[in-house]
Amino acid sequence: MGEDLELQIRSRIIGFLSGKVDAPALSRWLGSATWEIDRWAPAEAVELGHSLQLVLDEFQHGDWNSEELRSQLRGLVGVVDLTEPTVVSTRSGSTTVKTEIALLLSDAGLTIEWRPAGRSLETAFA
C-alpha cells in the first residue's frame, strides 16, 4: 500500500491541476491518506506527502495565490505549463513560433498527451 501512495498523491495533484479536484478536497484527501505517513510509507511518498501538505498549508495561510499554488504543484509532479510560446521574427518578415518543453519524469507510469492546437499539456499516471 505504501508504495502506491506516491502514485496516488501524484494522481491527486494532477486531478487538481486538471480542474477535477479543488484545493480543499485535495487537502482533505491528503490528511486522511497520509495519516501517520512517517510510520508506514516509503521515504519518497513521505517526502512528497509532506511537500504537498506544506504547499497546501501555505496556500490556505495566504502565502500563495491560486496561480502560485498551481505552479508549486506542477513543480511537485514535474509538469511544465506552457503559457507563452517563443515567437521569432526574421529580417525577411517571416515569423516562426517555437515551443520547447522540458519535463522531469520519474520512474512512475506516466502518460503525456501534447495538444499543440490548444497549447495544453495533460499528464496522467497509469
Image (spheres, rainbow, N blue to C red):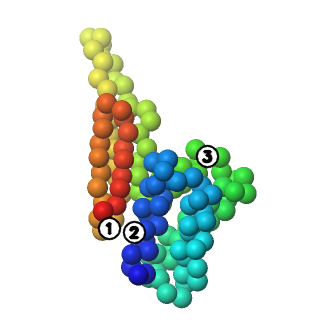
User: Which image quadrant: the C terminus?
Assistant: bottom left
Residue count near mark 2 (Cα–Cα under 10 Å), binned few <14, some 14–19, many ≥20 = some
Quick one: which residue is furthest to the right in this view?
A: 61
User: Which image quadrant: the N terminus?
Assistant: bottom left
Q: Are marks 1 and 3 in contact (CB under 8 Å)?
A: no
What kind of residue is marked 2?
Leu
Residue 44 percent location from the top left of the image: 44, 76
Residue bearing the label numbered 1: 108
Is residue 75 visible in the rendered image? The answer is no
Comparing marks 2 and 1, which lies closer to the viewer? Answer: 2
Going 60% across and 55% down the picture, which residue do you hit? 23
Is residue 93 visible in the rendered image? The answer is yes
- Name the element at disc 1: loop
Q: Nearer the viewer, residue 124 or 116?
A: 124
What kind of residue is marked 3?
Ser
Q: For residue 7, which numbered disc appears in the image?
A: 2
Residue count near mark 3 (Cα–Cα under 10 Å), binned few <14, some 14–19, many ≥20 = few
Going 44% across and 74% down the picture, which residue do you hit? 5
Q: How many marks?
A: 3
Q: Is residue 68 left or right of residue 92?
A: right
Q: Are marks 2 and 1 in contact (CB under 8 Å)?
A: yes
